[in-house]
Amino acid sequence: MSKRALITGITGQDGSYLTELLLGKDYEVHGIIRRASTFNTERIDHIYEDPQANNRRLHLHHGDLSTAEQFTNLIYNMQPDEIYHLGAQSHVRVSFDVPEFTGDVTGLGTTRILEAVRNSGITCRFYQAGSSEMFGSATPPQSELTPFHPRSPYGAAKVYGHWMTVNYREAYRMFSANGILFNHESPRRGETFVTRKITRAVARIFTGKQSKLYLGNLDARRDWGYAPEYVEGMWRILQQEAASDYVLGTGEAHTVRDFLEEAFSYLDLDWREYVELDPRYLRPAEVEYLLADASRAHRELEWEPRIKFRELVRIMVDADLEAIGITPKGVGRAILEEKFGEWHQWAGSVSKCLEAAAGSALGD
Ligand code: NAP
Ligand code: GDD
């Protein structure tokens, strides 16, 4: 019999890839979406089936992590085998503007789902979307053994969610596991995160639609990987015999400046001619250096990322060129074909999603 999964944050970058992965593994997938006055499902429109269709395997339910109101009933009625809790206010700089809201949704949201599982009395496996932001100023490389020192309301909220997940494991013997994921990016990355902000700007500058790109701190170092590989890691974490916590990352760190260099030079452009500092993108406290030691995941999950920094940049620039309507240079696309021969391919996953984004179609 096929398994049933519930995903919070299904409309986000990771939620959309995870849905594709699980549908490919024959799961029935349920997702929580927020009611919005405009379409907010563009990342999953290409896989959503008509609600009237028989035997559909993707189901959406309205809900908001800021209230527990319907989660116990929903989970009791659904009886999921696995819950992937990905929903969050996930933007670090924004968390300084709305610290209380971030604590509520990103922190308490985790407790609301854990409590709903406990109250419903069902047995299922729970995944918490933890973050390398929890390490904050801790000395790199960071592993499962590195003490947390968060530097933002977002990081602090994720530390709370992490320990609640551990607590439900210890107190109630729940299968609740933390993934501590370093930055992972893709053509579906939100446009205000630095990688996508850059690759989108590169495509727009290349086609004369934009002249300047305003950024904050260019010295911060991040361990950037490719999102589809990370959702596969999440799935592996929940397939282990016992619940535990795992760091996922590439083990390579680069500065924002390196990202600019790589993205602009791919199209023979010099980033220095276009990039300017805007202090509004600086953070009151910065996380300077994140670098994963993912050796435990390599050993126990047999998880090893195949897409590294340079390839990631090319995939994202190619996708933003295609999104803007011009034929991509093609190196990124070829990398996917060569290295990612399984469920995630350009034609099925990248192009389809870009088409869907152009005309969001999912009604309610
Ligand atoms: P994302 O693209 O920002 O997606 C966040 C998801 O959460 C969206 O579906 C969003 O819905 C939903 N959401 C936000 N507030 C909500 C609320 N009040 N109630 C219900 N749903 C809500 O994030 P992502 O990059 O896919 O990341 C997935 C998870 O992993 C997040 O928890 C993030 O903090 C964590 N994480 C991400 C990374 C990374 O590098 N991407 C690394 C470590 C950890 P809307 O679409 O309606 O906004
Ligand atoms: N967003 C943004 N916008 N970041 C900028 C900019 C800018 O204009 N200019 C410089 N940066 C720097 C930030 O200061 C930060 O050091 C780095 O670029 C990365 O910023 P983001 O892309 O916003 O990601 P993040 O590292 O803060 O957070 C992401 O990764 C976390 C995992 O470490 C988010 O996805 C979090 O949800 C995730 O947990």
Image: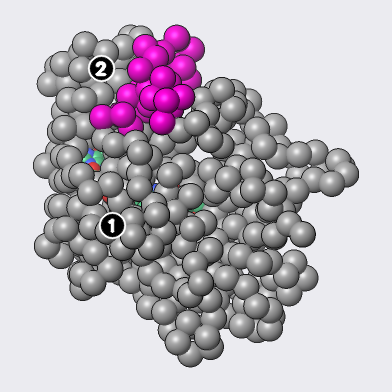
- Relative side of 309 to 121, left or right: left
Q: What is the magenta range? A: 310-339
| SS class, disc 1 | loop
Residue visible at 14% across and 58% down? 140
Q: Residue 101: in sight, yes or no?
A: no
Question: Disc 2 beta carbon < 8 A from ligand 2?
Answer: no
Residue visible at 54% across and 81% down? 174
- Relative side of 280 to 13, left or right: left
Residue occupied by mark 1? 294
Q: At which x and y percent is residue 134?
A: 28, 65
312 or 238, which lies in front? 238
Q: At which x and y percent is residue 109?
A: 50, 69
The amino acid type found where label 1 is placed reads Ala
* Contact check, label 1 and label 2, Cβ < 8 Å: no
Q: Residue 71: in sight, yes or no?
A: yes
Residue occupied by mark 2? 266
In reply to whether residue 330 is colored magenta, the answer given is yes
The C terminus sits in image quarter: top right
Residue visible at 32% across and 24% down? 314
